[in-house]
Image: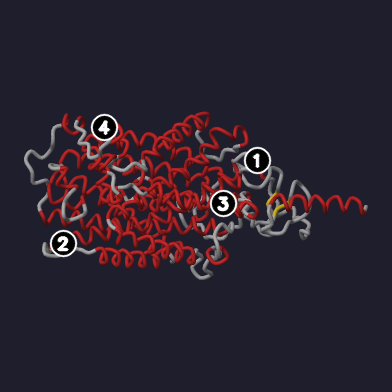
């Protein structure tokens, strides 16, 4: 039976249905605390959670983390193979801008959800709250696992690309040196361990590091945008616009239109960090306004600057086949050597590596907050360990360590060859996209008037914008699973293993749900005391809402009978 306690009128502000939030707490329920709360704490309490982090992120520093996760320069360098290799220059310039229109729709729809539900659980929490009655836990289960898979693959894939660039630079400096898979794996592991230490620091230090890192990222990107056209050694410096915009160099065995769609994997993976402000919202001041703004800023600024970089490369590249098939094993390094003097190319490659370090650390931070949020709701085995917040740093250190160990294990794919490790990029794109689409589609097609908007919203255009984003996701999910070859040429080493490497764990957690998890997983767990529909009783923390409701109502009936 739930414990009872008379609610202090000074501690109760108003019930949930009067707040600009869409909460897992039913309308009429009143969160209870024994102390005065500021506006940010009141929002998180209204959503059913205690304030456990220090709110030391601002709009700017939140944007800095998400922009660091985007890491436009290293992301572009890491995924150049997909844009240039699948459809040539036309695929690069057209593919990026077309994809960005729809990605911006997804980002804006996500920002609207963030304003109404600014929690670390992010999309997982939104799916649970918005789903039709009875389906919330299952929607949260699928969203959470897909999002988590995408999050934990981000840092390993970034750090692998960074390690490959470092070893490519070493190979350029010493042509006799040929990097091995083991060297790439060990260097990737070292980088991940360094990121683990940084991500475990107190929030103010993490915010400061990411602020400096993002500032450097933006400055480096501007420098590269200027340096490549100014420093190209070729004559003429630029290719004709007709050739750049109108020539599809199809590197696949699919029709040109499909090849252009396949280039979107680079755009989607590069831009997948714009959800980071959602996961950092419990550490952000003025979260229900600053966090959604940071989401839209990240997607908009990142999309525009990324397109500029695409055009610079598309106008200056000479031989696409030579870039893709270079012995260096890193298309970005091959491209730089093709268009710039060796020393200048090495300098730009060095800038890219430094930016990649900042990006990998941002990915590690964002993923750790997602792991913490899901562990808080007991989604994982041993959740009691992963949801602990370090008393000294006030950060989820255990979650950081878990992600690091899993990331290092995933990096063993390096030893299986380029195709196997390359699947990490597609997995991250598809896993994140599916996680984005589930709560947005529920918001668009099933919620109706049950969605209570936050202070940042899209007005009457919300459903239409969200609908466009969802349709784009539905189109891209099968495209992201296509291999570049087909028919007799499709051998195991040429296969796109994304559908298996992402689909297998998603199938496993679905089976887990059917067999066992549906009996105990009820979605986001409330860990804040609250009054149920005006009943003057404070329920036990951690007990499911419906169970608590029935117990409190039984108490009320019992009391009235005694009278």
First reached walking from the N terminus: tag 3 or tag 1? 3
Extreme-left residue of the structure? 235
Secondary element at image label 4: helix
Tell me if residue 216 comes above or below residue 104 in the rendering: below
Asked which quadrant contains residue 205, the reply is bottom left
> Where is mark 3, residue-wise?
40
Of circles 2 and 4, which is in front? Answer: 4
Q: Is residue 165 left or right of residue 543?
A: left
What is the CA distance from the residue labelled 2 to the residue labelled 4?
35 Å
Extreme-bottom residue of the structure? 392
What is the CA distance from the residue labelled 1 to the residue labelled 4?
44 Å
Residue count near mark 4 (Cα–Cα under 10 Å), binned few <14, some 14–19, many ≥20: some
Secondary element at image label 1: loop
> Where is mark 2, residue-wise?
171
Secondary element at image label 3: helix
Extreme-front residue of the structure? 488
Q: Give how far across and how far down residue 427 sits, in percent.
A: 39, 49
What is the CA distance from the residue labelled 3 to the residue labelled 1?
28 Å
First reached walking from the N terminus: tag 3 or tag 2? 3
* Residue nearest the observer in this picture, 423 or 124: 423
> Where is mark 1, residue-wise?
133
First reached walking from the N terminus: tag 2 or tag 4? 2
Q: Give how far across and how far down residue 73 sits, in percent.
A: 27, 50
What is the CA distance from the residue labelled 3 to the residue labelled 2?
51 Å
What is the CA distance from the residue labelled 2 to the residue labelled 1?
59 Å
Q: Which residue is found at the position 17% from the left and 38% from the top?
A: 315
Residue 427 visible:
yes
Residue count near mark 3 (Cα–Cα under 10 Å), binned few <14, some 14–19, many ≥20: many
> Number of numbered discs present?
4
């Amino acid at each position: 039976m739930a414990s009872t306690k008379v609610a202090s009128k000074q501690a109760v502000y108003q019930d949930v249905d009067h707040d600009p939030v869409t909460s897992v707490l039913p309308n009429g329920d009143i969160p209870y605390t024994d102390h005065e709360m500021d506006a940010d704490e009141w929002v998180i309490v209204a959503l059913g959670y205690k304030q456990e982090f220090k709110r030391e992120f601002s709009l700017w520093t939140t944007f800095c983390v998400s922009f660091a996760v985007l890491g436009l320069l290293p992301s572009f360098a890491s995924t150049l193979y997909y844009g240039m290799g699948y459809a040539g220059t036309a695929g690069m310039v057209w593919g990026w801008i077309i994809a960005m229109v729809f990605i911006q729709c997804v980002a804006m729809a996500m920002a609207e959800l963030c304003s109404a539900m600014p929690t670390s659980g992010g999309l997982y929490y939104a799916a649970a709250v918005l789903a039709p009655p009875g389906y919330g836990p299952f929607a949260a289960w699928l969203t959470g696992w897909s999002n988590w898979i995408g999050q934990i693959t981000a840092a390993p894939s970034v750090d692998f690309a960074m390690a490959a660039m470092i070893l490519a630079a070493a190979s350029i400096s010493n042509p006799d040196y040929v990097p091995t898979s083991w060297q790439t794996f060990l260097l990737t592991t070292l980088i991940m361990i360094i990121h683990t230490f940084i991500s475990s620091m107190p929030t103010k230090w993490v915010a400061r590091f990411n602020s400096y890192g993002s500032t450097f990222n933006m400055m480096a990107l501007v420098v590269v945008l200027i340096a490549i056209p100014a420093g190209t050694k070729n004559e003429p410096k630029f290719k004709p616009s007709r050739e750049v915009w109108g020539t599809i160099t199809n590197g696949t065995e699919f029709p040109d239109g499909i090849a252009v769609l396949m280039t979107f994997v680079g755009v989607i993976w590069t831009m997948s960090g714009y959800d980071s402000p959602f996961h950092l919202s419990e550490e952000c001041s003025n979260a229900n306004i600053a966090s959604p703004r940071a989401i839209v800023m990240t997607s908009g600024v990142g999309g525009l600057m990324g397109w500029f970089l695409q055009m610079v490369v598309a106008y200056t590249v000479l031989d696409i086949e030579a870039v893709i098939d270079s012995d260096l094993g890193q298309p970005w390094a091959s491209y730089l050597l093709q268009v710039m003097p060796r020393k200048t190319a090495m300098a730009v490659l060095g800038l890219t590596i430094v930016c990649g370090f900042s990006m990998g650390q941002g990915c590690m931070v964002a993923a750790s907050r997602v792991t913490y949020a899901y562990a808080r709701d007991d989604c994982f085995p041993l959740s009691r360990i992963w949801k602990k917040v370090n008393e000294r740093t006030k950060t989820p250190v255990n979650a950081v360590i878990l992600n690091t160990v899993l990331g290092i294990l995933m990096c063993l794919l390096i030893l299986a060859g380029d195709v196997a490790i390359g699947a990490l990029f597609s997995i991250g794109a598809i896993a994140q996209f599916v996680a984005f689409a589930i709560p947005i589609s529920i918001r668009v097609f099933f919620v109706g008037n049950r969605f209570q908007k936050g202070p940042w919203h899209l007005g009457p255009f919300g459903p239409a914008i969200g609908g466009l984003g969802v349709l784009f996701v539905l189109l891209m999910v099968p495209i992201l699973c296509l291999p570049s070859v087909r028919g007799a040429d499709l051998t195991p080493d040429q296969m796109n293993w994304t559908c298996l490497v992402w689909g297998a764990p998603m199938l496993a957690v679905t089976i887990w749900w059917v067999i066992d998890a549906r009996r105990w997983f009820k979605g986001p767990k409330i860990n804040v005391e609250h009054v149920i529909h005006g009943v003057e009783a404070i329920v036990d923390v951690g007990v499911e809402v419906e169970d608590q409701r029935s117990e409190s109502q039984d108490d009320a009936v019992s009391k009235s009978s005694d009278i």
